Amino acid sequence: MLDKKLILGVFDDGDKLLSAVTKLRQKGVEIMDCFTPYPVHNLDRAMGIKRTNLTVGAFLCGLTGFLSGLLLQFYMMTNHLNTFKSWPMIIGGKPQNYGMVPSMVPVTFELTILFTAFGIGILFFYRAKMIHGKIAQVLDLRQTDDLLLVAIEQDHLHMDRSELDGILKSNGAIEIRERNLEGTSNAKNS
Amino acid sequence: MYEANIRKPLVTGGKTISDVTNDICRPIENKPTPMWWLGFTISFLLLMVFVGTIGWTTWEGIGVWGVNKTVMWGWDITNFVFWVGIGHAGTLISAILLLFRQKWRMSINRSAEAMTIFAVICAAMFPLFHMGRVWLGYWPLPLPNAYGSLWVNFNSPLLWDVFAISTYFSVSLLFWYLGLIPDIATVRDRATTKARKFWYGFFAMGWNGSARNWHRYEVVALILAGVSTPLVLSVHTIVSMDFATSVIPGWHTTIFPPYFVAGAIFSGFGMVLTLLVIARSVLRLQDYITVEHLEAMTKVVMLTGSMVGLAYLTEFFIAFYSGVEYEQYAFRNRAFGPYWWAYWTMMSCNLLAPQVFWFKWARTTPWFIFIMSIIVNIGMWFERFVIIVTSLHRDYLPSSWVMYSATWVEVGIFLGTMGLFFTAFFLFSKFLPVVNMSEVKSILKSRE
């Protein structure tokens, strides 16, 4: 992995971070990422993050679950798919053809939900590159506690460094740091 | 920053962001208090009662219970419905209140969801062991088998229940775990011991609070809330169909699904209140789980209690109005038959008692709320007992009328699941943050 040089603006409040990010984006500064202990609303929009298409994935997973539920029950309970190899199960004289569709509703519904939930969960972990046991890339140990960071790549900065510092400071940054992205997981508490 | 001038602050005590972390991580990072040990020991002993009684049931067979040919469902299914119902409050708080953008959910959703998961585990024990041969407990699954094309019966509501409960459990677990990840990462980054660093690091899955991931995370949370909401409503609907699709007078009622869902939310909030009134004082969380929170929950209790009460009265009226003598007898027998005491316990605990919450004093006095929550729990247990046992014990054939009473084994199993539930909850409060830190941090009033 390349050694990225980062400039970190450290904040203690989401609103200050948000206004700093908005200002920086107006000036055309490319923001690598922000790290916050809690979700700061509208920060994603201010950073210009494209809306995730995980919702489409959720729909497709749900559709898969819905169809699997129907297929499962048509396969097991009716002969429409020519699956009665030995004997049909006649229980309480209940229908064994399309007439049992109302009975299929609960299981089809549950499977739709099950597939949607686990599908979206897995897709999320995949997109966020998260897996059990992964070593977190933490720039500052307090970024999951009470500090909020904005990270800007030095190489992509087309702005005078003092101007950047000025914008960060005037929006309430309590500190400005530089850091290499490599080996950051051992960052000491500030 | 979340500000609403017409509402009181959701977190009191002028907390800063780091105060939240310190307060919530305290029980995890310090040795357990004597109170914790006391509670844990009692719960663990009860859990051992569960192991003993359920072991005896498995060894000897269902004959050690009081159930018989007429009353084939007794305490076991009563307890099953009771525990499933309790689980519903967690999903209601975390999913439905998320969709409604109710911010007060944020400091109670974690513990309520934990409660959901533990309650569903307790619930699952009963049908599983009621099958008698628990080692064949996988038979309700639609697995290919060597008996020809002998599949499970998808026309049966009991099978729908298998799908509903297992979906509910696994989706709730996923939702809970997803919510825990940022907080586990917080604990990981504060960890001072190697073991803690490793385990919390393992389960935090590399979370670092990146805004890109928060963006995805919030979308996923919203979708999960969106699917959990119809899920939670479907679960108790399907549980009610276990009864409603039968032809037993007293069970064969179309009002059952909405009535069961309201009852589930009612009993769930009862249990949430029981737990949180204790937890907030033992874990010193009064600034996070404030009296405002308790008040909001008592309002839900009052509303759903009244809905359940309305359902009781509607059932009675419809039995009369239907002109079906079996139906009429079933209800007359409920109120004035040999199990009258169960019926009137249910009526007074569920319909009458929650009406005290019309008064502000009742809604804002923790010790009183605690007593009321116990009453709600008792009332809802009796509701299920009344529905199941009084409907079964006198059916169409008077020669098969019997009385049912539980044996010590059934009582032991029920108390034992209490032990299972509370043991799990105590362990949860020791090893995981009981309040959703990352969400609470976003609703602090302006900090200076």
Image (tube, rainbow, N blue to C red):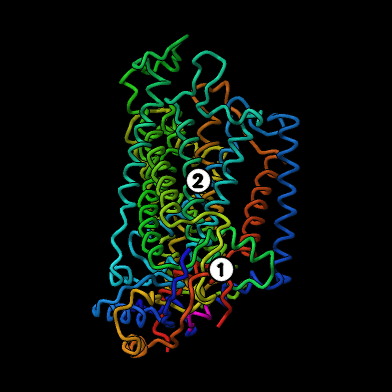
Q: Is residue B283 magenta?
A: no
Residue that lies at the very extreme toward the left in this rendered image: A26
Left or right of A68 in this view: B26: right
**Three-letter code, disc 2:** Ser
Q: Mark 2, chain letter?
A: B
Q: Are marks 1 and 2 in contact (CB under 8 Å)?
A: no
- Image location (x, y in percent) of residue B402: 60, 28
For marks 1 and 2, the one nearer the N-term is: 2
Residue B4, visible in the rendered structure: no
Q: Residue at x 56, y 31 (%)?
A: B393
Q: Quadrant of the C terminus of chain B?
A: bottom left
Q: Nearer the viewer, residue A94 or B329?
A: A94
- Image location (x, y in percent) of residue B223: 36, 53
Magenta segment's dominant SS is helix
Residue holding disc 2: B170
Q: Which mark is residue B134?
A: none
Picture layout, residue B166 above or below residue A99: below
Numbered disc 2: secondary structure: helix
Residue holding disc 1: B277
- Image location (x, y in percent) of residue A69: 39, 31
Q: Residues within 10 Å of mark 2 (few under 14, many from 20)?
A: some
Q: Mark 1, chain letter?
A: B
